[in-house]
Amino acid sequence: MKLNLFKRNSLALSFAAIFLTSGLSAQTNVFDNVIATSPNHTYLEAALIQQGLNVALQNPAGTFTVFAPDDAAFTAIASALGTNIAGLLALPNLTDILTYHVLGSVVPSTAVTNGAIVQPLSTSNTLKLTLTASGDVYVNQAKVIAADLTASNGTVHVINEVVLPVETVVDVAINNGFTSLTAAVITAELLPALTDPLATFTVFAPTDAAFNNLATALGTNLAGVLALPILSDVLLYHVIGTEVLSPALVNGPVATLNGQSVTINLTAGVMVNDANVTTPDVLADNGVVHVIDKVLLPSLANISELSATDLTVYPNPSTDIIKISNINIENYSILNSNGVLVCSGKVLNNEIPVMHLDAGNYFIQLNNNTEKFQGRFVKM
């Protein structure tokens, strides 16, 4: 699937009123005193100057929050799009991309709440914020790596990736009234993974009625469903790591990010396990969504839920390593979602390498003769 960066209308000149502000004072501002003085933001500085947006950010009467991708982030997005920095700066919707990184109010990191959906100066899309249990802050898929660099007219949060105002599978859920699924994705801290504009997903999306039916079957309500310890397992069981449109579906098993497979049955319509696909092929820029009428439940029968203290690991999801804080147990074991041991070893410097694991959902266990800890993490 090719990423469509050009389908949206250009940003209306909402900055025009700001540009008309006369005379700048000697106060500090987010452009001159934060971005332009940073050795790691030369590409962002150049892009803002080229598009004339530096003038707005110099306005002493302004109130801004800038999510500022560093130079490494610009280099990475240029490479991913098959171009270079010059090609990136020549994009016809560069103004829209840049203003997608700016809020018209000051939001310190302490004010971020998990699952907040905020409107940047770009009107093409909203930004989705994540505050993880370990305290990390994400803006869409980008992690805040330096927060609260303040100036008189706002604050700057440095991020490690460029965010793009494209429609993701998360937007499909939000914009089409999948409130229960959206709440579950937020609770499980999966927004950063599913808002990645360069990833590709197929999501089998249960309706609100499907979540209500699950809650009833479990003798609880939606809050009880969201509190399930297997929530991440359940959600990732609904996601395939490639785009599969309905004409490409075939009878048989398909691996999910959970590590287990769902079964496609085309005998009478389209079924995924025992769920019917009621609306196929709702397209997003990073994949496709098929609406289903039941929540799919993975098999966790082989996973031993130890009588153990909950273990929090971070970053989660992870790509290379996971970290553990303040636990003095050396030996670890990692099990896949079927409860099969996939690796074990010793914790070194509170870190465990996971780069060799396939994408999916895993359990990690730490134990000695007197203490036991268990937690879950997602490997992307």
Image (spheres, helix red, strand yellow):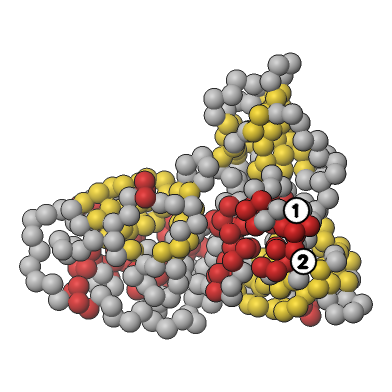
Question: Could you classify mark 2 by the number of other residues whose Cα lies within 10 Å: few (under 14), some (14-19), or many (20 or more)?
Answer: many
Which residue is labeled 2 in the image? 294
Q: Work out whether residue 98 or residue 130 is closer to the camera in this orientation and state it.
A: 130
**Residue furthest out toward the top:** 369
> What residue sits 46% from the left and 81% below the top?
8
Residue 332 image point, x, y percent: 70, 28
Q: In the rendered image, which quarter contains the N terminus?
A: bottom right
Residue 130 image point, x, y percent: 49, 53
Which residue is labeled 1 in the image? 219
In the picture, residue 291 is in which quadrant?
bottom right
> What residue sits 48% from the left and 49% below the top?
131
Residue 137 image point, x, y percent: 45, 49
What residue type is disc 2 on? Answer: Lys
In the image, residue 46 above or below residue 260: below
Whether residues under marks 2 and 1 lie with C-beta atoms below 8 angstroms apart, the answer is no
Would residue 50 be seen by someone viewing this image from the given angle? yes
In the picture, residue 51 is in which quadrant?
bottom left
- Under circle 1, the secondary element is loop
